[in-house]
Image (cartoon, coloured by chain):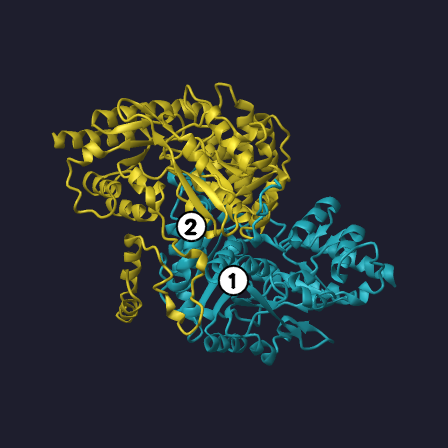
Chain colours: A yellow, B cyan
Amino acid sequence: MVTLLVFRTMKRLNLCKLLLDKYVVLNLKSYRSVGFDVLSSRTSHVVADRLNGIQENVWVELIELAKEVKPVNLGQGFPDFAAPEFITKALRDALKQPDIFLNQYTRSYGHPRLVNALSKLYSKLLCRELDPLNEILVTIGADEAIYCTIMALVNPGDEVIIIEPFFDIYEPVTKMAGGIPVFVPLRPKKTHGPISSADWVLDPKELASKFTNKTKMIIVNTPNNPLGKVFTRSELEMIAELCKKHNVICVMDEVYEWLVFKGSEHIRMATLPGMWERTLTIGSAGKTFSITGWKIGWLYGPRELTKFPQLLHENCISSCATPLQEAIAVGLEIENEHMGTPESYWRDLVDTLEPKRDRMAKFLTTVGMAPTVPEGGYFMMADVSEIASKIDLDAETGMKDYRFVKWLCRNKKLQGIPISAFYCNEHRNLGENFIRFCFCKEETTLEKAEQIIMDLKNSLL
Amino acid sequence: MSSRTSHVAADRLKGMQESVWVEFIRLAQEVKPVNLGQGFPDFAAPEFVTKALSDAVTGPNVLLNQYTRGFGHLRLVNALSKLYSKLLGRELDPLTEILVTVGAYEALYCTIMALVNPGDEVIIIEPFFDCYEPMTKMAGGIPVFVPLRPKKTHGPISSADWVLDPKEFASKFTNKTKMIIVNTPHNPLGKVFTRSELEMIAELCKKHNVICVMDEVYEWLVFKGSEHIRMATLPGMWERTITVGSAGKTFSVTGWKLGWLYGPHELTRPAQLLHQNCVYTCATPIQEAVAVGFEIEMERMGTPDSYWQDLIETLEPKRDRMAKFLTTVGMAPTVPEGGYFMIADFSEIGSKVNLDSEQGTKDYRFVKWLSRNKKLQGIPPSAFYCNEHKNLGEDYIRFCFFKEETTLEKAEKIIVDLKKSLT
């Protein structure tokens, strides 16, 4: 921790940039206390309190490393192959169309063609008429859906239950809203032999103990990132019972809803008895159509709940990009027709990803990493403790998984993501043996990764 | 969900209601008027930009459809850095001094939420772009309003005639003042703040140690005789100023929702962190296309091929045409020095019309009456004033003149017929 005196000295010596870089590496908790008091004569600090404890996320540091090293990148979750042509063509057509309004502002809560397409799709899947105007909000990716949901519904002091390992933004956004995150981990119920994401479970007693009279919300991610767990109906029912008993809002992050492998089924919490009225469900065009860079997502739920994130969105972003929404609407219209048929893009995506999943699980196993085979999504977690124990990680800093990830990147040019980032401070040890890889990559990428892993194994014999 | 002790909605939404836009978009959809309300062009966006987007998504670089850098796509922040370094006369660091956002809207949101604490005062100059107030309140800040007032009431009025009263203005600065938001060129007035006006604001910012947020989205739309001056270039102001820009206004693609802010790292950094947790990153292909647009435009800046030059030359006659037909029917327009809005005092015409069937302040009633009965839509400027000062806006209507000639012709006809029907 750098004191104010040191900071001011460093500033005078024009070492500010160095200082700022070090902040990222040191994972500074109390950003505000050093006080970027450039404007120092005011009584109140420059930075708002809601940013207390908020630091740059895990991605930034590792993206910097990747730029430097240029590894085979299985880190961040996006495909390295082309987006489907029917979508990119739809955008190209939208831009050429005589309807010039497709380049101008559209409806704040969602472009009519898109909310109508979403309504049509989800009404079918939910078996209820979803009102496109009042029960849907289109957002800047699932990220903004989460942000608006939490900021619109969580007050200072409200508890928010977060299941670990969790997608990293749930915690900082809860804190920015003044909420208190309450963590409960999924744990593997076996430690030997082939492990599936289905083997990672909640302890019912432990989960129940987390619900108090301050609990406002629970966030559930299914299929889960990073595990790939697809919550079963009975697991969702257990969560539902507690939500109903304690009058808790259920936020379902279902961005990987279309990526479910053979043997599993994606079940929507919003369809469970008594849950529609207390559930907000989040989706993502980025994951749906392999266009993570378009940053369009949505949420849906009962009007009594959606009206609040709608209002927040209106005063935060105002509206989302029109031509992108138009193209996604076209994509959904096409896919709606093809669902369940051999032409379905989602069917094709699953058929493409499943062998990649199996290939990765195989080569990780042969090198002594113990993968958790995911039932859904496009990430795989692997226990690296055996292999890491054979390597000198002293040149790197941080928790064990961070050190292994950085070592692997620098020395073997293969990048993954450290899993302890998906746990709260107190539980980081639960993640420190694991690394996450993304298998939504070209065959050539996976070949290179496999080669690196094999070479690594050979080098350690 | 009544048995919980805490309410469903978070307190930060208290007092927030649907914005003026939602109500009037709905009205326009119902009535289908000649729409001079919301600010966007009704003709095609420039092809060099739309082609760039099309190329980005269908081109060989597949990564242009995937996540890019959170604080701004490299090609874009480099282009912005190149452009603004030139205009600011200082090297703008693309990585630490720029943040790319979802429109100027998110730039304002992140700036306010990242820097304003409960109890902090934020000075807002009226009439104001409507989001400044709810954003300040969401951050727990206290908006403090100070109006521009026209210094003449007869004869041709320019937006330059709308001024702050120096004493009144100075009185708004207290030891709780954290921030002031200044919009130049100004929406809805079209005022382009002069150097001495900006210096007056700057002096007070420095004296009271206040952060200056400059909403400069219309920076390229300044008509003959006026000059856009960047507060960030004034002495002592770089270190305390965040400036906001907009691709939507820059390239007439309001539906692309891409904007940015720039300033010293000490101020951009908190906004970057807030952005990271709010949207994380902006759309890659859109950023790529806007970068290409800037690269092209930077080459031709100051030449006859400049898109921005062309835009001004297109808009200035439209401005003059609208000012003329509004004047001939007895509305008193304020001729804007920049931007693409014009406000006009309709009180003379309004007094001859029965507005009883509509609700709200006088301008809301006139706008709704005009839309429903004459199929011409504007925006009521009292939406741009705080509750206590709504009377300052209620004699005015705002029209957007960034429209096709045919649209302006139709509007002119409706106005002239209206006048005839009242004589």
Question: Which of the two marks, 1 or 2, is nearer to us in this view?
Answer: 1
- Helix, strand or loop status at disc 2: helix
Which image quarter holds the C terminus of chain B? bottom right
User: Where is the N terminus of chain B found, in terms of image quarters?
Assistant: top right
Mark 2 = which residue?
Answer: B276
Q: Is residue B404 visible?
A: no
* Left or right of A91 in this view: A64: left
Q: Nearer the viewer, residue A157 or B58?
A: A157
In the rendered image, the vertical position of residue B299 relative to residue A257, given as above or below: below
- Report in which chain the residue with disc 2 lies: B
Q: Residue at x 28, y 71 (%)?
A: A12
Secondary element at image label 1: loop
Residue under label 1, please give it: B118
Horizontal and vertical percent position of residue B58: 44, 37
Are marks 1 and 2 in one subunit? yes
Of residues A175 and A256, which is closer to you in this image?
A175
Q: Earlier in the sequence, mark 1 or mark 2?
A: 1
Hey, which quadrant is residue B15 in on the image?
Answer: bottom right
Question: Residue furthest toward the left?
Answer: A461
B356 over B121 or under it: above or below: above
| Residue B266, x across and y down, in percent | 38, 64
Residue A283 % position (x, y): 50, 36
Determine whether, in the image, residue A329 is placed left or right of residue A227: right
Marking on residue B418 = none
